[in-house]
Amino acid sequence: MNDAGLNRVDAWAEVGRARKHESAELHVRGQATYTDDIAELAGTLHAALGLSARAHARVKGIDLAPVRASRGVVAVLTARDIPGLNDCGPIVHDDPILADGLVQYVGQPIFIVVADSHDNARRAARLAVVDYDDLPAILTPQAARAAASYVLPPMRLARGDAAQAFARAPHVVKGELHVGGQEQFYLEGQVAYAIPGEDRGMHVYCSTQHPSEMQHVVAHALGLHSHHVTVECRRMGGGFGGKESQSALWAAAASIAAVRTGRPVKLRADRDDDMLVTGKRHCFHYEYEVGYDDEGRILAAKVDMVSRAGYSADLSGPVATRAVCHFDNAYYLSDVEIRAACGKTNTQSNTAFRGFGGPQGAIAIEYVIDEIARKLGRDALDVRRLNLYGKTERNVTPFGQEIVDNVLPELLAELEADSDYRARRAAILEYNRASPVLRKGLALTPLKFGIAFNVTHLNQAGALVHVYVDGSILVNHGGTEMGQGINTKVMQVVAHELGVELARVRATATNTSKVANTSATAASTGADLNGKAAQDAARKIRARLADFAAAQYGGLASEVRFAAGTVFVAGLTLPFGELVAKAYLARVQLWSDGFYATPGLHWDAKTMTGRPFSYFAYGAAVSEVVVDTLTGEWKLLRVDALYDAGRSLNPSIDIGQVEGAFIQGMGWLTTEELWWNPAGKLMTHAPSTYKIPAVSDCPEDLRVRLFDNANVEDSIHRSKAVGEPPLLLPFSVFFAIRDAISSVGDHKINPPLSAPATSEEILKAVEFVEAARG
Ligand code: MTE
Ligand code: LUZ
Ligand code: MOS
C-alpha cells in the first residue's frame, strides 16, 4: 500500500462522524416497530385498568358485576388474583400493582379488566361501583412538610460553616420559590404485551427503559424465577425517564392477566389514563437564604427543598439526592447547607424525568443569582462569572468531588462573543425604552451536570457481539433505544473497533435473555456504559482475528490493522469478510460478550459525600424573548447554545439531543402546567389542557454548537454524555422572561416568578413590579 492509502486508513474512523439515526428511515416511513405494532398472536386479549376516583380512601366494598357483564369481558382481576407479590416499587416496596383496600391517589389502579378488544376493556373498566370511605388527603409538598409526611427520611448536605459565613456577609437575600413538575409526554404511551409460554415461561414485550427490572417485577408478581421471564424492547417512542420504573405496573398487570387467562394479553394505556396513573417530574418548593458581598460573590447559602414525591417512594430518593448534588450548578459554594425532603402526597408517584432532580436543584441557585444581580444593579452574567468554580482552587463540590476539567470560563467567553451578548443587551435596553408594552429580555445561564448513576452499583453494562460467517455483525447490549440514538452510537463503536463500515453492523432488540442484569438506560449513561461494553466485546473478537491473521500470513498480531472494511496484515490486504470466513473454518470464536463497570466511583449516602460522578458535562445558552406585558404572552426570538459533548461520538445526534432537551426544558419552565383540583384529581391529563411546546414554539433562530473538549476521563472515545444535561439550558428562557418583566421596574425590582412561567404567572409578576414601582 502506498502512503496515500495508508493515510486514508489512518484517518479512517466510524466514531465522531455525523451519522443518521439507525432507524431514521423506518421512523419517517412509519415502518419502525413499536410494542403496539407487534403482530398479535391468535387469541390475544386486551386489558384496561380500573382506577380510583378518590385521592385517599378505604375501599369498603367494590361491585365488579357490571364490569364482568360488560360486552366482551373475559376476566376481572383484583389484588387477590396476583399469584406472587403485589408490588412494583423499584427500591422501596411500597408500590402495589393493584390497590388492596386502600387507595392513595386519584388514578390508582384497583383492578384489571381483560376483554376481547381494547375498546371493550376500556369501556368495562369504568363500570365498577366502588364504595369509598374518604380519608384526609395531602396534595402539595408544602402541606406534606407541614405534616412531616415523607416517603423517606429527609437528607442534608453541609460544608463549611454557614452560620458564621452569614454573620459576616454584608447582604442577605431570603425567599421562596416554587418550580412545577412535568409530564414526560412520550409520544408512545405505556404498553406491555405478555405472552405465556411453556413451563411457566412468560415473554413480555414492553416499552421500557429498564428491561431487567421489568423481568424482576414480573417474576415476583407471578411467583416465578427470573429465568422464567424474558423482557424485550426494540425501541420506545420516547421514555424521558417515565419508563425507567413506571413501565413496571403495565408489564406486571399484562403478565398477571396473561397467567390468569392463559392467553396473550396486551395492555396499552390511552393518554388520559397514562397521565392519570403514572408519575412525573417532581415539583419542588424551596426556601432559601443566601449571603453575598458588594460584588455579588456568594459567601453563605442555605436551601431547604421539598418535592412532591406522591404516594410512594419510587425513585424520589435518588432524584432528591441528585437535586442536592446539583444545587451548586456551576458555582463554588464555600459555606453551604442543603436540605431536601420527599413529601408524601396523595398524588401520582413521581419518578425520573430527564435531568432526574438535577434541573430542580440547579434552578434554585440560578434564581438566587438572578436576584442578587438585580439587587446590586449588575448584569447577571457578571455575577454568574464571579461565582463560577475555579480551575485549580475553589473547585471542590459541596459533596467533596474535585472538578478537574472546568471549561466553563472558556465556554462562557466563547458563547458571550458568538452570541453578541453585550451588544444585544444594549440593544434590548434601547428597545425597551421605546416600547411600553412589548418588552424584550435576555439571559445567559451555564450548566454543570454530573455523569454516572448516583447509586454506584448501577454503573455497569454488558454487550454481546456476533460476527457472522458472511462478515455481517449483530450487536446486542443492555441499553434501550428511546430515540436518543444509543443504538447508532453503539453500532459506530463496534464498526470502528472492527474496522468496518457502519452498514455492516446491525443492532437488535434489548432482551433480558441476551444480556443479563442490566441497569436502566438512564442518567445519560446509556452510550457511555453500553458503548464501552460493546467495545470490550468487539476488541476480544478483533484480537482473535488478529491472532489468526498473523498466524496465517505472518507478522505480529499487534500490527494487524482493521480499517475501512479491510484487514492489513504483513503487507497484505484482504477484505474483512474474507478473513472472517477463513477464521470460521479454522474454528475461531467469532462472537463475544463484553462488560464495563465505571471505575473510581464511591458515595457515602449518610454524609452525602464522595465521588458520585465519573465526570461533569458543561454547557451554556443565551435566550432572547419578547414579552407582551398586557397579556403575558411571549415569544422566544433567538437561542445560542454551546454544549460540551466531549469528543462527540456522533455530532448530528448530539445536536439533536441538545435541541430536543432545550425545547422540552423550555416547556417545563413555561407552558406545561400540572393542575390538580381540590379533590386531588389531575385535571390536565390530555394535550387539550396540558400544553407541551409545538413546532411553532421553537425559535426561528436556534443555534446549537458543540464545544470540543476531549473528556479527561477515559470515557468511550473521550465523549461526554448528552441525554439529560442540556435540559438545563432553557433556564435561560425562564430568566430572559424574568428579565423582560423586570424591565417594567427598570430592573430595580425582583419579580417573583414561579415555574412554569405561564401567561398568568407572567402577568402576576408584571403587576407585582408595577405595584412595587408605584
Ligand atoms: N431522547 C429521545 N429522543 N427520547 C427519550 O426518551 N430520554 C432522555 C435522553 N434523550 C430521551 C432522549 C433521558 S431521560 C435519558 S436518561 C437519556 O436520553 C438516556 O439515553 P442515553 O443515556 O443513551 O443518552
Ligand atoms: N440515579 C441517577 C439513579 O442519577 N439517575 C437515575 O436515573 C437513577 N435511577 C435509579 C437510581 N438512581
Ligand atoms: Mo433519564 S430521567 O435518567 O431516564
Image (spheres, rainbow, N blue to C red):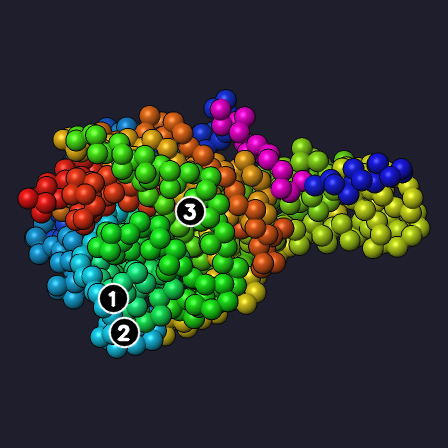
Q: Residue 309 occupies which quadrant of the picture?
A: bottom left
What residue type is disc 1 on? Gly
Residue 438 image point, x, y percent? 21, 30
Label 2 sits on a secondary structure element that is helix
Q: CA distance from mark 3 to mark 1?
A: 25 Å
Q: Mark 3 or mark 1: which is in front? A: 1
| Residue at 29 percent of width and 60 percent of height | 296
Residue 242 occupies which quadrant of the picture? top left
Range drawn in magenta: 14-28
What is the magenta segment's predominant secondary structure? loop
Give above or below for 403 relative to 126.
below
Tell me residue 455's x, y (percent).
Answer: 43, 63
The answer to whether residue 138 is visible is yes
Q: What's the distance in space between the residues labelled 2 and 1, CA to CA?
A: 8 Å
Residue 23 in magenta stretch: yes
Q: Is 439 on the left or on the right of 533, as rendered?
A: left
State which quarter of the image contains the N terminus. Answer: top right
Task: Looking at the image, tell me whether mark 3 or mark 2 is earlier in sequence order.
Answer: 2
| Rendered image: mark on residue 291 | 1
Mark 2 or 1, nearer chain start: 2
Instruction: Give the residue displayed 25% in from the left and 43% down from the top.
Output: 739
Nearer the observer, 749 or 153? 749
- How many residues crowd around disc 1 within 10 Å: few (fewer than 14), some, or many (20 or more)? many
Secondary structure under the numbered disc 3 in the rendered image: strand
In the picture, residue 66 is in which quadrant?
A: top left
| Numbered badge on residue 620 | 3
Callout 3: few (<14), some (14-19), or many (20+) C-alpha neighbours within 10 Å?
Answer: many
Q: Earlier in the sequence, mark 3 or mark 1?
A: 1
Q: Is residue 106 visible?
A: no
Against 545, is 404 above or below?
A: below
